[in-house]
Amino acid sequence: MAAFVDEVYLRDALAGRRVLVTGHTGFKGGWLCLWLRRLGATVVGVALPPQERSFCTAVGLEALIDSRNGDIRNETGFQKLVEGQDYDLVIHMAAQAFVRASYEDPIGTYMTNVIGTAVVLEAARRMPSLRGIIVVTSDKCYQNREWVWGYRELDPMGGRDPYSSSKGCAELVAAAYRSSFFNNRDGPQLATVRAGNVIGGGDWGVDRLIPDLVRASETGSPARIRNPRNVRPWQHVLEPVRGYLMLAARLIDTGSAFAGGWNFGCDRDAAVDVITLADLVVEKWNGGAPRYMVEKRANEPPESAVLRLDSTKSYVELGWKPLLSIGEAVSMTVEWHLRYQQNPSSIRQFSQQQIAEYAAAWSVSREKASETEPSIGVPACV
């Protein structure tokens, strides 16, 4: 069973560390950087400029870190952006992150998610003090056979659409770099991480369920739901981000034992269909609840109907497991957006408060678990 890990352990491992985060202007990258700053890390972010409406812009993240605008597809330009500072840790999150957009621009998707990953890893080879690299891919990297059980880290990569395929390819690129260039047990270690459909405050992405419902609450027009019975592993953004930070600390502290692939999926009860999640959002809203309608469009690009992850490895070897129920995750997301609508200037503090409360709940859960859990066990994760 994994050794005890809490936020104190993270701070001991990451405080004062120089961390390069690609994709910090994205939704998940922004939450990661905000938590890294809480832990005392020095953060350099490289990404395309943020959207006018984004978590990064909402919380003023660029005032808290060394933010640099650049394109990971440009090897020469990216190398110039990361020169001048040595790094202990690289967390690569920059990506084209939308399935439907990959149908419209498959070449751009492969350029960003595959070539961009190789560009970042090539730059990492030139970092003398580097201790660890984490490449963030997706649960969609697996060859999806529509199984009712979760995919494990040793299952084959695949992908029926350009986005999913590009994430499988990114995993293969990372695996090749790990075996070719990061194979010294005493050198920097390379890991890849896969999570489910993340939700949380500050996501205004196009063609995503909760952002569509948020926009519906503002405009009064119903959100349009395309695939109401598709099952997804929904989880609050802080759940996988905590897993990434735990893994980062272990890569720095322990090394090669934590290289390789890792799943950070939701509890079985949180893998629900789209319509169930939409109803939960409406239920949690306090006045002006969004409306939605199911709309089947002609020539809609296909998407997988069922997708689950098995996170047993992360539980047994890393000590990670989900903390939040699906209801709690939705409540935190709705509370963030209601706060933002009421008082945008307070949203950085509120976001930091959500991280602090989540970290406190993690500490309490670990204390309770240490009193009751056996030396070996399996999680309730799918």
Image (cartoon, grey):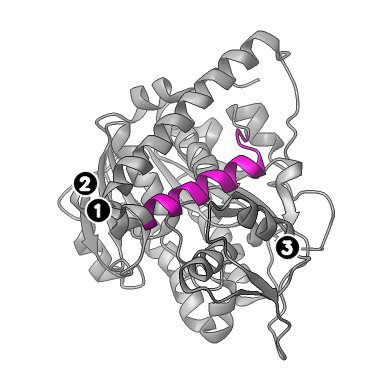
Are the two marked residues, 2 and 1, in contact with CB atoms closer than 8 angstroms?
Answer: yes
- Residue 335: say if magenta: yes
Which quadrant of the structure image shows residue 376?
top right
Q: Which residues are magenta?
A: 322-341
Residue underneath mark 3: 275
The residue nearer to you, when weighing 248 against 352, is: 352
Q: Amino acid at mark 3?
A: Ile
Q: In 3D space, how far apart are the residues under numbered discs 3 and 2 (Cα atoms)?
A: 38 Å
Q: Residues within 10 Å of mark 2 (few under 14, many from 20)?
A: some
The kind of secondary structure element at disc 3 is helix
Residue underneath mark 1: 60
In the figure, is residue 117 to the left or right of 299?
left
Q: Amino acid at mark 2?
A: Leu
Q: What residue is rendered at 46% in x and 68% in y?
A: 218
Residue underneath mark 2: 64
Say whether residue 99 is visible.
yes
For the N terminus, the quadrant is: top right
The kind of secondary structure element at disc 2 is loop
Closer to the camera: disc 3 or disc 2? 3
Q: In 3D space, how far apart are the residues under numbered discs 2 and 1 (Cα atoms)?
A: 7 Å
